Amino acid sequence: MSEKLKELDSHFAFGENWQKYASLIDEGRIQTAENSISSLLKKLPGGGKLVGKTFLDIGCGSGLFSLAAARLGAKSVTAMDIDPISVETTRAVFKRFLPDAKPDVRQFSVFDLNPDVFGKFDVVYSWGVLHHTGDMRSAIRKAAEMIKDDGALVLALYRNTKCDKAWKIIKRTYSSMPAVLQKIIQCIYMCGFLIGRTLITGANPISYVKNYKKRSRGMSFANDAHDWLGGYPYETISLQEMKKLANDLNLVIQYKRHIDDQAPIGFFSSGCGEFVLTRH
């Protein structure tokens, strides 16, 4: 793993996008985020809750899910991100919605995580992050080192597609564009996505955008589009690869969603495989 991957300038500026999204956070989006975490933890043997447990959010972004974990009763919340704007945004979100909470929010690279320094956690959560680190498999290994023997690792990772090579070129190019050009490409992408979806499913595009936050964990369609287009570095993983990696790490996949052995075409996006893993 190159030391360069620990540096901010080797990654797309996700922090600016999350800072813009944070202005949209409201009670409805927070509750949606809480429901998302709770539904994932329920997949654990015997069901799972966060009350009294420790929570590590790797790549906290806007801070929405760290906030949700705190509101769900986590004993402690540690939120980290390589982008200082995301760190600042996460602190601001807590100050706005849960001012009495005392999360540990810091700028940090996943590759510098060490259980001897941080301790281990009941729940290690990293949603749509590790595939942007530049060395996804090493990042997953680092995240896995941080869970307790009876803890859980909760991940979302891009599925591999037939368009992966093309998307790497697009994302690398988009990341280096001026903001004005990015906005134009973003608008073209969103229009193409909605038209394609309408032609395939017959769904109402206005209704899709209006209800996007309900079906997408409280997220925003525009912010997610910018995130997708600029998300570089970019890596993907198949179910078979994930199973092998989990076995190598002595982990069991307790739950998986949105991933199968047949990789999607990936013309507009790859979608994420969702995983909840525990120790053997």
Image: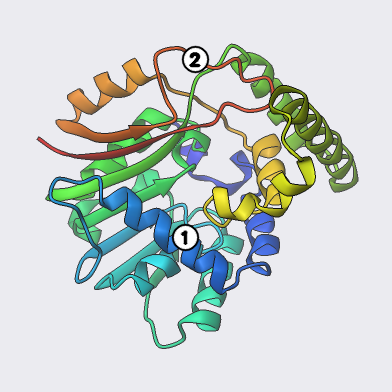
Q: Residue at x 70, y 62 (%)?
A: 20
Q: Residue at x 69, y 27 (%)?
A: 201
Above/below status of 97 relative to 206: below
Report the disc number at residue 33: 1
Q: Residue at x 76, y 40 (%)?
A: 204
Above/below status of 278 relative to 167: below
* Residue matched to label 2: 263
**Image-based side of 265 in relation to 17, left or right:** left
Q: Residue furthest front?
A: 202
- The colour scheme used to paint the residues is rainbow
* Disc 2 packing (10 Å; few <14; some 14–19; many ≥20): some
How far apart, in angstroms, are the residues tagged by discs 2 and 1? 27 Å
Above/below status of 135 relative to 85: above
**Image-based side of 187 in relation to 82, left or right:** right
**Image-based side of 232 in relation to 182, left or right:** left
Query: Where's residue 76, x and y in %?
Result: 28, 71
Label 1 secondary element: helix
Sequence-wise, which precedes: disc 2 or disc 1? 1
At label 1, the amino acid type is Ala
Above/below status of 89 relative to 268: below
Report the disc number at residue 48: none
The answer to whether residue 107 shows anywhere in this view is: no
Query: Where's residue 116, x and y in %?
Result: 18, 55
Q: Nearer the viewer, residue 132 or 196?
A: 196
